[in-house]
Amino acid sequence: MTFLALNGIPVPVTEGRRRQVSIGTDSRAFSGAYRLGRRAVRQEWEFKTLPLAPDEVLALRGLIAGDGHALAFDTDTFTSRGLARADATGAIVQGGRYGGGLGLPIGASASWAMQLGARWTTLHNVFSSSAGAWLHVLNRDDGKRWVQGAPSEGAGGLSVSSGSLSLSGAADAATFDDVVGLPFLVPDAWVPHMVAWHLARPWSALPYLKASGRFATAEVRVLGEVRDGEFVEFVSNGSRVVGERLEFTLREV
């Protein structure tokens, strides 16, 4: 079992520490008696990673920070960060992949100005009437695509232009669910983990993440923060590169 994973993606850590945070203030009475003002306890974890290649550093920084938007379509069409869609096409329908979904008439489209930038990754579920089932699709800005975890040419009705994410209805793809837009390019090694996670459950409501692994006794909902990066030279794929060793914090929420 992986020591630490964020939304199912293993994070290569070398050391860490845990800190317990008490909510409330303890004090002493005038008589000297100790008064317990603690109302709750939360955990924080601080970690250091292995040396990472530059591309992986950028992706891991974005992952830990919870960058991006997630669309659940359970009750509305706002993203997890409160971003409204740029049009009024389509409607919430029941019977999505996880709860509700977004139904689009044939030929219609819906978009969100997520400001994904030049480097991005998207995940989503789309119902294929020809297959009679929900299909999971992962797209990247370099043109690589995966459907049900296998390399594919189909984008599943999703496109990104000028940072905006768009969904479009087609003859065999008119219902979407759990759409995720990430403003960073994920490494190939992450793809199987992301697909396995997203096939089994909804993505977390970004910026919140689900942390799991041997570092804790149970899965924890967290907010992440990257603090420092230490530049190091090391061998990656047979070549010497200058990468980073990241220091980051996860806070239980």
Image: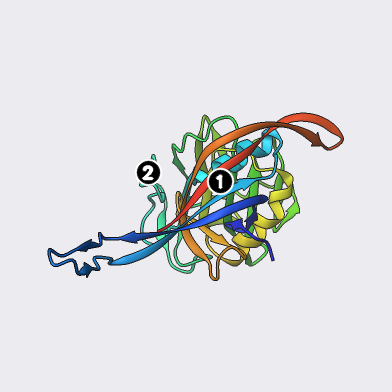
186 to 73, vertically: above or below: above
Residue 116, position as x, y percentages in the image: 52, 35
Give residue 51's quadrant in the image.
top right
Nearest to N terminus: mark 2 or mark 1 = 1
Query: Residue type at mark 1?
Result: Leu
Residue 152 numbered tag? none
SS class, disc 2: loop
55 to 97, vertically: above or below: above
Residue that numbered label 1 is attached to: 63
Residue 83 numbered tag? 2
Image quadrant in which the N terminus is located: bottom right
Front-most of residues 205 and 74: 205
Q: How many marks?
A: 2
Q: Is residue 168 visible?
A: no
Q: In the rendered view, how is the structure colored?
A: rainbow
Give residue 50's quadrant in the image.
top right
Query: Residue type at mark 2?
Result: Leu
Q: Residue at x 55, y 41 (%)?
A: 62
Q: Nearer the viewer, mark 2 or mark 1?
A: 1
SS class, disc 1: helix
Q: Residues within 10 Å of mark 2 (few under 14, many from 20)?
A: some
Residue 84, position as x, y percentages in the image: 36, 44
